[in-house]
Image: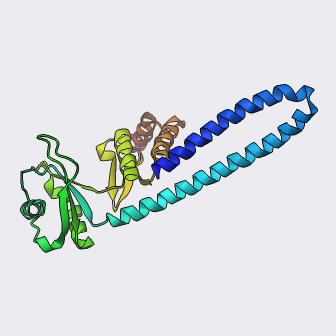
């Protein structure tokens, strides 16, 4: 799907460049050539029609990509990624996971509760690869996910198995707002805005908009932190005067 979007973007760019060149040449000829004037009008109509068609195609591809992403995320609802689990030769990843869940989360899950598990990617030397675990029941997956705070300090972390578009949005949000400024839940990415509001972001444009809104609020008169501090202290000073 990404390759289709890229092809359409490149085609649109090439079309606009070639049409701009042709239109420039046509405008130079039109003042002295009546036929060229008529051709210019037809050219503009054709250009506008083609641009509109390309924009419609882009919108349809974007909608289709969104639907494919949603469907892919549904297939990953029962999955979690385990990071920081030591890797060993001829290991049984399901048994590894069950052992650490029993130790740190007091879990009573058994092998029958795990549909499958395996390391992600190719071996990378001494660096342990994350383990993808698919649970048979969504309730078991959720129980483990919402108890993940018990793993704090163990070096083991959990994350949701996001699709590439959602993972890209999540990483962009982390770069912009920090690790504590964003999180995922049920495959959706959330950002904690400056006012404490939790906002769901589905694209890089959504991430940028939160930053733009924050900058706009800072620029408004009377909304700076110093001004807010002064306004907060004023009632306390007035109350102190009344007590004296």
Residue at image location 14% in from the left, 55% down from the top: 151
- Which quarter of the rendered picture does the C terminus lie within? top left
In the image, residue 209 above or below residue 136: above
Q: Can you see residue 240?
A: no
Residue at image location 20% in from the left, 47% down from the top: 122
Residue 118 lies, in percent from the top left, at: 18, 58
Residue at image location 46% in from the left, 36% down from the top: 224
Q: Nearer the viewer, residue 180 or 35?
A: 35
Q: Nearer the viewer, residue 203 or 69?
A: 69
Left or right: residue 64 versus residue 146 is right
Residue 150 lies, in percent from the top left, at: 14, 58
For the image shown, how many numbered marks are present on the structure?
A: 0
Q: Can you see residue 172?
A: yes
Left or right: residue 20 versus residue 114 is right
In the image, residue 18 above or below residue 82: above
| Model colouring | rainbow
Residue at image location 56% in from the left, 43% down from the top: 9
* Residue 235 sits in quarter: top left
Q: Nearer the viewer, residue 152 or 186?
A: 186
Residue 52 lies, in percent from the top left, at: 69, 49
* Residue 142 sits in quarter: bottom left
Residue 97 lies, in percent from the top left, at: 12, 61
Left or right: residue 65 versus residue 11 is left
């Amino acid at each position: 799907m990404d390759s289709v979007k890229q092809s359409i973007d490149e085609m649109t760019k090439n079309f606009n460049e070639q049409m701009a060149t042709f239109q420039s040449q046509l405008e130079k000829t039109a003042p002295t050539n009546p036929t060229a004037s008529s051709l210019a009008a037809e050219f503009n109509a054709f250009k506008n029609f083609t641009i509109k068609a390309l924009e419609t195609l882009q919108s349809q591809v974007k909608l289709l990509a969104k639907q494919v992403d949603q469907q892919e995320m549904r297939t990953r609802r029962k999955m979690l990624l385990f990071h920081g689990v030591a890797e060993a030769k001829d290991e049984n990843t399901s048994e590894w996971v069950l052992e650490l869940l029993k130790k740190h989360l007091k879990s009573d899950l058994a092998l029958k509760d795990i549909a499958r598990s395996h390391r992600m990617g190719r071996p990378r030397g001494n660096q342990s690869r994350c383990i993808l675990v698919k649970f048979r029941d969504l309730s078991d997956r959720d129980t483990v996910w919402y108890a993940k705070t018990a793993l704090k300090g163990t070096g083991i972390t959990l994350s949701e198995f996001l699709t590439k578009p959602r993972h890209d949005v999540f990483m962009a949000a982390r770069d912009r707002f920090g690790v504590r400024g964003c999180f995922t839940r049920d495959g959706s990415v959330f950002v904690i805005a400056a006012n404490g509001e939790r906002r769901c972001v589905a694209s890089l444009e959504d991430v940028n908009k939160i930053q733009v809104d924050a900058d706009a609020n800072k620029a408004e008169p009377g909304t700076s932190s110093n001004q807010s501090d002064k306004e907060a202290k004023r009632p306390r000073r007035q109350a102190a005067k009344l007590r004296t």
